[in-house]
Amino acid sequence: MASNDREPSSRVGSRLREEIIRFAVIAGYLYVCFGALIVYKAAILRAHGVDFPILGLAVVKALVLGKFILVGRDLHLGERHRDRPLAYTIVYQVIMFAVLLFVLSVIEEMILAWVHGRAPAEGLSHVAGSTGLEILASCLLLCLILTPYFGLAALNERLGEGRLGRLFFGE
């Protein structure tokens, strides 16, 4: 009976471990991407005499968006056309997740603005910028960041779980 009692907890522990690894991978990837963009933005702004704080921004953004991505994946967002050619599948997933991340980020920032006594509309400018061109640039950058992640994930799924990792890193 003791072995039966351990089986469910073993499965829960295994599932938790898998989820933590999934979260660490996507959050780490997003951290590197956002960190590079934030450092670049800070460098440009400082060249024009504008001080731009960069500490922690990439970490928070990566953790929040990483969790949003995991929620979307658990809800099977973007998996509607998995039987189509790989390029179509990747583009579809990137667009679906970019929309999800943009909408959830706007909602999050509007709530934070409201909590801090600012107008909720300020949330949009904190997510993507205040002009149409800044919003378009933010959306394009987000799609560019998501493409390798979803491309490799789709390729891994088509090749068979773990095979892509073995191709990259050996056995």
Image (tube, rainbow, N blue to C red):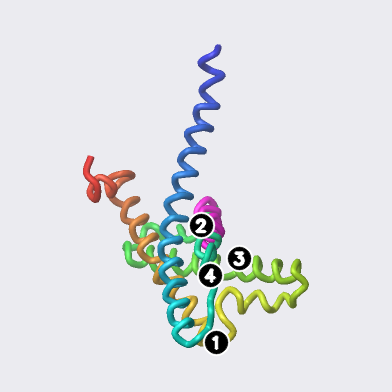
10 Å crowding of disc 4: few (<14), some (14-19), many (20+): some
Q: Mark 2 points at which residue?
A: 66
Q: What secondary structure is found at the residue carrying circle 2? A: helix
Q: Name the residue under label 3.
A: 104
Does the magenta-highlighted stretch encompass residue 70? yes
> Which residue corresponds to the image point at 47% horizontal and 61% vertical from the top-left?
78
Q: Which of marks 4 and 3 is in front?
A: 3
> Which residue corresponds to the image point at 51% horizontal and 53% vertical from the top-left?
70
130, above or below 12, in the image: below
- Based on the displayed image, in which of its 4 quarters is residue 131 positioned? bottom right
Q: Mark 1 points at which residue?
A: 132
**Which of the two labelled residues, at mark 4 and mark 1, occupies the earlier sequence position?**
4
Range covered by the magenta-colored residues: 61-74
26, above or below 57, in the image: above
Please, what is the three-letter code of the amino acid marked with disc 2? Gly
Label tally: 4
Q: Is the magenta stretch mostly helix, strand or loop?
A: helix
| Tag 4 near tag 1, CB within 8 Å | no
